[in-house]
Amino acid sequence: MQFGGAMFFTDYSMSAMELARALEERGFESVWAPEHSHIPLSRKTPFPGGGDVPKQYYDAMDPFVVLAAASQVTKTIKLGTGVLLVQQRDAIQTAKLVASIDQVSQGRFLFGVGGGWNQDEMENHGTVYASRFKRMRESIEAMKEIWTKSEAEYHGEFVHFDPMIARPKPVHKPHPPIHVGGAFPHGARRAIRYGDGWIPTAGRGDIAEVLPKFRDMAREAGRDPAAIEISLFGLGEDLDRVKRFADMGVARVVPMFPPEKADTVLPIIDRWT
């Protein structure tokens, strides 16, 4: 099992450079940055965690910017989006961003993606909430074409382009690993269809119960379950639970650290270490 760390990077938190260095020095495998472009004041969908949307959701910096900065002060730690809201981004431009950060980090990028929960946010980007998952799938399929073909084209309902050339290509071949966030069974099904990994959240549902079902689902779809990494986000400081998940074949545990300065965050990291 590998260990990562995630944080909403803001102008009042540890910087991504500071956190990435601290994690790398302590043997962590990866650092992850979530995404929200903005938070509308209207609320068609409730916050999944209940109550008000936390302040850091409004304040999050762009994940590509902070992870690219972190890549330049580290050597081995992997850099992941946890998760990028691809359904509200342009697919061609996002493919360029992914390839570029994979180049500047020398192949260390992990592409975590998700369909999102905030209907108001995605509608501001012109994305229809009801069809967001189909748009996400088409975006991923189109990006794979761009990353792997010298001349790429894609023709979908939401993403459509004629033959074109887009470079650079990613360092990681055929492309950076795609980790699909979402709950069981629908998020798991999307991960099996077009992902290299699945990101469930520890606080939503009984992960121990659904892991065997996930593996059965993968086999039924003709995928090798061992080839789909499971990265468990949001797990608290519970050593026994971590050990149980390691025994069950979870590939990675990623705690979410508070968006605070080093004097608050480093003691938490040291307990995980």
Image: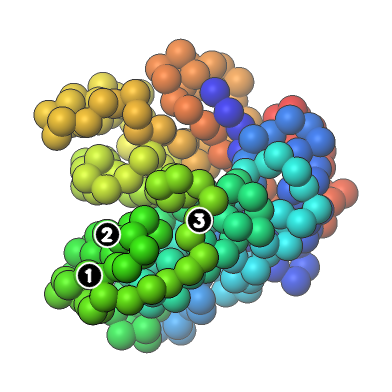
Give the residue type that dot 2 points to: Glu
233 or 164, nearer to the observer: 164
Q: Which residue is mark 1?
A: 154
* Residue that appears at 32% across and 68% down: 151
Could you tell me residue 146's position as x and y percent? 36, 64
Point out the image quarter for the N terminus: top right
Identify the secondary structure beneath mark 3: loop
Q: Are marks 3 and 1 in contact (CB under 8 Å)?
A: no
Could you tell me residue 245's position as x and y percent? 46, 21
Q: Is residue 95 visible?
A: yes
Q: Earlier in the sequence, mark 1 or mark 2?
A: 2
Between the residue at mark 3 and the residue at mark 1, the CA separation in whole angstroms equals: 19 Å
Could you tell me residue 225's position as x and y percent? 29, 26
60 on left or right of 128: right
Q: Are marks 1 and 2 in contact (CB under 8 Å)?
A: yes
Give the residue type that dot 3 points to: Pro
Between the residue at mark 1 and the residue at mark 2, the CA separation in whole angstroms equals: 8 Å
* Residue that appears at 60% across and 57% down: 103
Looking at the image, residue 11 lies above or below residue 111: below
* Residue that appears at 68% across and 41% down: 77
